[in-house]
Image (cartoon, rainbow, N blue to C red):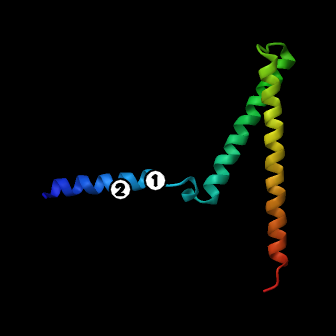
Amino acid sequence: MNSINKVSTLDLLKTNQDTKKSPIDGGFSKILEKTISEQNAVQKNADMASADIATGEVKDLHQAAIAIGKAETSMKLMLEIRNKALSAYKEITRTQI
């Protein structure tokens, strides 16, 4: 096997390994950043829908109501996750070693 074939075989192996990474490989900060950016996009969409309703430019009232409801539900979920994380942090700080 010549060196060119060895290099291309190694490249294929590396490519296969890179594609098998799970979303957790990015770490907690990457997951948190992605979740917050998704939440921000949902909130912006709901804000635009609310503005369209207020100005009378709404094309589909049903879709606007769904966007607002989705934003409300996702915000409640984010707040509950934050509350659970703070509760866990407080519990850990109270733990005696």
Instruction: Tell me whether circle 1 and circle 2 mark residues in contact (CB < 8 Å).
Output: no
Please give the residue where the numbered disc 2 appears in the rendered image: 14
Classify residue 67 by image quadrant: top right
Kindly identify the amino acid type of the residue bearing the numbered disc 1: Lys
Residue 68 screen position, x and y as percent: 82, 30
What is the distance, in whole Å, between disc 1 and disc 2 at their CAs?
10 Å
The quarter in which the C terminus is drawn is bottom right
* Mark 2, secondary structure of its residue: helix
Residue furthest to the bottom: 97
Sequence order check, earlier mark of 1 and 2: 2
Image coordinates of residue 17 in percent, x first then y, are 40, 56
Position of residue 63 relative to residue 7, above or below, is above
Horizontally, residue 73 falls left or right of residue 40, namely right
Residue at (35% x, 56% y) in the render: 14
Side of 74 relative to 33 (left or right): right
Residue 55 or 23: which is nearer the viewer?
23
User: Badge 1: few (under 14), some or many (20 or more) residues near its Cα, within 10 Å?
Assistant: few
Q: Tell me residue 96's x, y (percent).
A: 82, 84
Amino acid type of the residue that numbered disc 2 sits on in the rendered structure: Lys
Q: Is residue 85 above or below residue 66?
A: below
Question: Looking at the image, which residue is at 58% across and 57% down?
Answer: 24
Element assignment for label 1: loop
Q: Which residue is mark 1?
A: 20
* Quadrant including the N terminus: bottom left
